[in-house]
Image (spheres, rainbow, N blue to C red):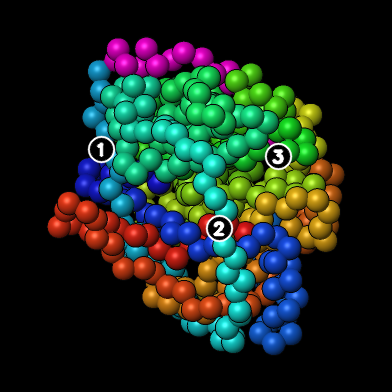
Amino acid sequence: MRFASGPHLGRVTLRRLVVPLTVVATIAAVVIGAYYAFAPRTQAASAPDYSGRAGLIPQAGSATPSQTSAAAASTSARNVIKGAHSPHSVQLRNAQSHPTTQGPRAGSAALDNRSAGALLTNFDGVGSRDSGVSNFGAEFEPPDQGLCVGNGFVVEPVNSAYSIYRTNGHRVAGPFNVNVLFNEGLTEFTSDPRCYYEPSTHTWYAVILFISTVDGLGVDFTDHAHTDIAVNTSGDPTTPWTVYHLDATDDGTNGTPNHQGCPCFGDQPRLGIDQQNLYISTDEFSILGPEFNGTQIYAISKSDLLHHASNLHFAQFDKLSIGGDIAFGVQPAITNGPADAEFMMGSLDPTFTTDNRLGVWALTDREKVSQGGMPRLSSVVIGSETYGVPPAASQLGSSSFIDSGDDRMQQT
């Protein structure tokens, strides 16, 4: 998330909470194999301790890629300082209100180290200068990239711009202010875009987090947040997208659960999908305080999305724990084709040092989401190769170091 490292935003000094380092698992088929292979000798699969709810997400309008850049560029730059980060934030560690006890240890699992594919082409994508052009002169480093490819197009949203390309690198639309894609005001605070193209339905999906600010100027936070979802079923991302806003405030208003320290926001929304649903997981932090409430998992009816329903059926899972600790950084799988469950994975490193376990989650009865019901969620701890938080990295031409992030799961 693109928080500032020094200025006061609202009533609390906020920092970039965490910066992901890729801890890559293989695709869902390997996840499923690991789930069953390791469960007998680590921890039996069980229904985890969680609560949940089913609800509806109202449609929030539509978004059409349009030339907003000139208007943005002609406006004086806002006094917004963003981009500094602290991957092992004291705020995150101190927010855990329970002991960080280690779960059961397991033997290491052998990995299949296959050779990487050859680079076919490359071209310059969306950069900080594009953000400056489309976002009132404000540039962000690093830009928190989202990227998806399909049907001859490349869509790249970042903080805080997006462009649409052909796969040969020719830009066909943009750069635009990234808020345009989610039907938000140009100066509103958004962060951490992700996107995915599903070939079987020729559909584009994109998500981003939103936090309300005083007068919508993107500076001083107030008391509301949501996770924005944009969907385009035409196969052509230059045509209109349908937008939905999932309330993430979780303070007991608007049908949301009443969590400690809220109003809250869903940091780093992560995408997964299968034949039944779109899946989003976030890490919930207080907007105005130090509280951390762990991962929230949302299952959203894909049928509703594909039919541009006026209201989307969804299910939310909260108060999740695994391996003796609060769930954090759970990554849903991109599941292509039939599957017995939607699988999700997350690293288990509560002390931000090293570990050799992974948490695996399985969501079954997934069809119940479209019916307004609740699926079943279970979990298991499996063994892995030892992993950990990497050291800072040196950079050419400078005596300073690059913060190399943390050890969250980034792909399953």
Please say if the residues under marks 1 and 2 sit with CB atoms less than 8 Å apart. no
The residue sitting at 61% across, 48% down in the picture is 271
Residue 410's place in the image compared with 48, above or below, is above
* Residue under the image location 38 percent in, 22 percent down: 134
Q: Which residue is mark 3?
A: 198
What is the quadrant of residue 186 in the picture? top left
Task: Give the secondary structure at mark 3.
Answer: strand
Q: Residue at x 79, y 29 (%)?
A: 307
38 left or right of 250? right
- Residue 71 visible? The answer is yes
Question: Where is mark 1, residue-wise?
Answer: 81
Measure the alpha-carbon separation of dots 1 and 2.
Answer: 38 Å
Residue 395, x across and y down, in percent: 24, 55
Q: Secondary structure at mark 2?
A: loop
Q: Residue at x 66, y 24 (%)?
A: 236
How far, Cα to Cα, is label 3 from label 2? Answer: 23 Å
Can you give x and y, in whole percent of width and height, for residue 389 in the image?
39, 69
Residue 105 relative to residue 22: left or right: right
* Label 2 CA crowd tier, 10 Å (few <14, some 14–19, many 20+): few
Mark 3 Cα-neighbour bin, 10 Å: few <14, some 14–19, many ≥20: some
- Disc on the earlier residue, 3 or 2: 2
262 or 283: nearer the viewer: 283
Nearer-N-terminus badge (3/1) = 1
Give amino acid for label 3.
Answer: Glu
Q: Which mark is residue 116?
A: 2
